[in-house]
Image (tube, helix red, strand yellow):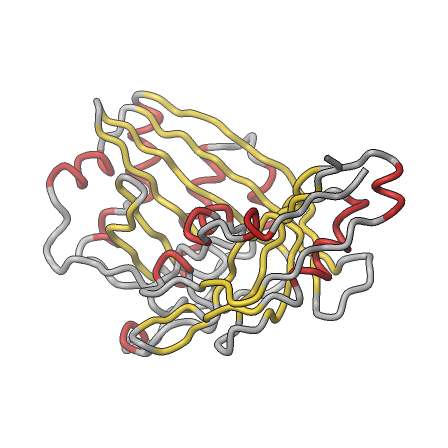
Amino acid sequence: MRAAFSRRSLALPLALLLALAAFPAPAGAADVPPDSLPAAWAAILRGPERVRIEHRANRRVPATFVSKLPSWTNYSLGRHVETLVGERAVALMASLQLERWLDPPLPPRAAPCPEVGSRRESLSLELTRGRDTARVVFDLARGTIVMYRSDQPIRGARVGRESASILRSLAEAFPGDSLFAGIRPCDRDAPPDSSVRGFADVIDVSKAEELPSVLRQVAPKYPSDARKSGIEGAVMVQVLVGKDGWVRETLVARSIPELDQAAVLAVEQWRFNPARMHGEPVPVWVAVPVNFKLR
């Protein structure tokens, strides 16, 4: 049997893959309209009929295999999904008072607290009122929140040390979510002028004006033991593309243990045109599927 890994399969537009990246940065620099929060948006924040929380936590640990560049593996710490309806949904939103942060909006270009440690959270509330829906994404460790409509960021705010009170309100509303205990909320506010200080070191790729594109692709070598054992599939590798277009780090987001090292060693050799913001190259994480097929 011959391993089939075509260049054509590698040439998929990166724009189709970016949504799979595991480090969404809700603290990215969304373009925020300067007007007050529209009535419909305010209404769904004040009086939703339903609030659904989705909370995931992962821990990033060094990969156990040998690689040329820093490489990591994600381990899931758990997932909690729960829905509040009626008065309980309204009571939660009243305690959070998100409208005071999102109107007037503050573009969260600089998070009050840096990203530290190996733990990563994905924490969001989906709000429903009639046919209207919205989503609020929290990054309480870094001190930011972002409101989305139709998957587009429409409002963002730096909540800074108020992250602790937001965390308490969420934990009281969802006592069954044990993942809250592992969050260390941001403990300081952003400088007053931080909204005009440019972008964080690694920006949210969805905010880049020009997405990265592949200049050079390297196909993986199929491990002989995996081939003999009939193991195939796709390893999802997240890649930190530097300002110079070279790969700086990798993270195995979806693992096939027998194939992970081969996938990472191949992707480490890829070269990209870097992403750009305001005409300048910026580092971003992108997701690349590395496919292994026996036939």
Q: Residue at x 82, y 34 (%)?
A: 230
Q: Pinpoint residue 72: horizontal percent, then vertical percent.
A: 70, 58
Q: Residue at x 65, y 61 (%)?
A: 218
Q: Pinpoint residue 19: horizontal percent, then vertical percent.
A: 45, 47
Residue 274 visible: yes
Examine the image and state in which quarter residue 90 appears. Answer: top left
Residue 164 visible: no
Q: Quadrant of the C terminus?
A: top right
Q: Pinpoint residue 73: horizontal percent, then vertical percent.
A: 70, 53
Q: Pinpoint residue 149: horizontal percent, then vertical percent.
A: 26, 41
Q: Establish if 274 lies above or below 64.
A: below
Image-based side of 249 in relation to 124, left or right: right
Image-based side of 84 in relation to 133, left or right: right
Between residue 273 and residue 98, name the one nearer to us: 273
Between residue 7 and residue 274, name the one nearer to us: 7
Q: Establish if 111 lies above or below 126.
A: below
Q: Residue at x 28, y 28 (%)?
A: 128
Total marks in image? 0
Q: Quadrant of the N terminus?
A: top right
